Image (spheres, rainbow, N blue to C red):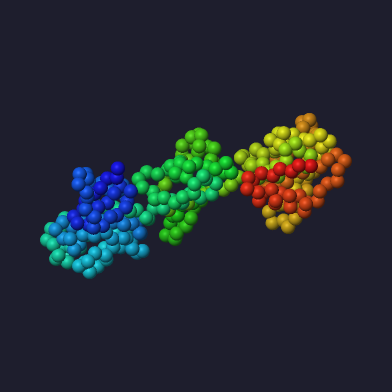
Amino acid sequence: MPTWVARAGVGFFCSCSLVLLGQAPGPGMEIAVANLPAQTFGINDLLAVSVYSAPELTRTVRVGAEGQIRLPMIKRSIAAAGLLPAELETTIAEAIRIEQILVDPVVTVTVAEYCSRPINVAGAVKRPLTFQALGSVTLLDALTRAEGLSPEAGPEILVTENSLSSTGAAQSVTRRIAAKALMDNADPELNLRLTGGEEIRVPEAGKIYVFGSIKHPGAITMKDATDTTVLKVLALSEGLAPFASKQGYIYRRRPGAKSKEEIVVPLNEIIRRKSPDVALAADDILYVPDAKGRRLSITALEKIAGFGAATTSGLLIWRR
């Protein structure tokens, strides 16, 4: 059951940050003093200000774009952003005394709703969402709220934080977190503490397209970008089909290049461990023609790969 809070005529608040104005508690309803976690206020936060014996000053107010709030009968705006509840209570009480409204005002400030600490989780997660950083929140907490990484998630998690430079200018800093190290708790320092304003993006893993004389052609997700080789991809595809050519071809587009580069791969030599294995990169096409068959053109290969990448399952399967 939610906890209800009564505050000097302003209405009632429940622990889920919902504000119900002008509604009295029902018979037998428990009245308790509660509040959201005490944090410094920010822009758009909704505050409940209660002044004892002054219903005209008791109300809910939202922190404006300049970090200030306005109360009736008080001529000047009151700075709220960056203050804790107790600090804002003192500031409001002092403003009331200066305006000679009350001699010794008793002010209480509670938080009805935090809106100034959004954390965005997007990309290859099961449930992208935005939530407010209430209390202590870590990177793992944020990913748990998003129901974890999706099967298409890549090896890195990008965390973008807004900060101020040495000159006071706003800047964005992006950190790259290894997903495996974070999930396996191999490095607890990677479990960043979040305070709000962060954007967490999980890029999808790159894919390598394998087809031709392969037992199971398809698009293979690169779970580890540093350890994806021709031998590993052939193993995931269950090896070469009968009558496969002794050599294959990797088609790769270098950054800035207009056309794809062709790299000859000595498959037999690699399998017999007489030639070093060849590393593959995201979006590479590994093509193994028949021993006596005619090779497909790169245009045809890209069309097939593009068709497979557009399928709902994300898998490419060709049957000869």
Q: Is residue 91 visible?
A: no
Question: Residue 144 vs residue 283: left or right?
Answer: left
Q: Relative to 256, is 29 above or below?
A: above
Q: Relative to 9, is 191 above or below?
A: above
Q: Relative to 183, is 110 above or below?
A: below
Q: Quadrant of residue 269?
A: top right
160 vs 27, nearest the viewer: 27
22 vs 36, nearest the viewer: 22
The number of callouts visible is 0
At 62% from the left and 39% from the top, the residue drawn is: 224
At 51% from the left and 50% from the top, the residue drawn is: 122
| Residue ranking furthest to the right | 292
At 29% from the left and 59% from the top, the residue drawn is: 80
User: In which quadrant will I find the N terminus?
Assistant: top left
| Residue ranking furthest to the left | 103
Question: Residue 38 vs residue 271: left or right?
Answer: left
Where does the image place residue 95, in percent across and percent down from the top left?
20, 63
| Residue ranking furthest to the top | 272
At 52% from the left and 42% from the top, the residue drawn is: 149
Question: Residue 44 vs residue 286: left or right?
Answer: left
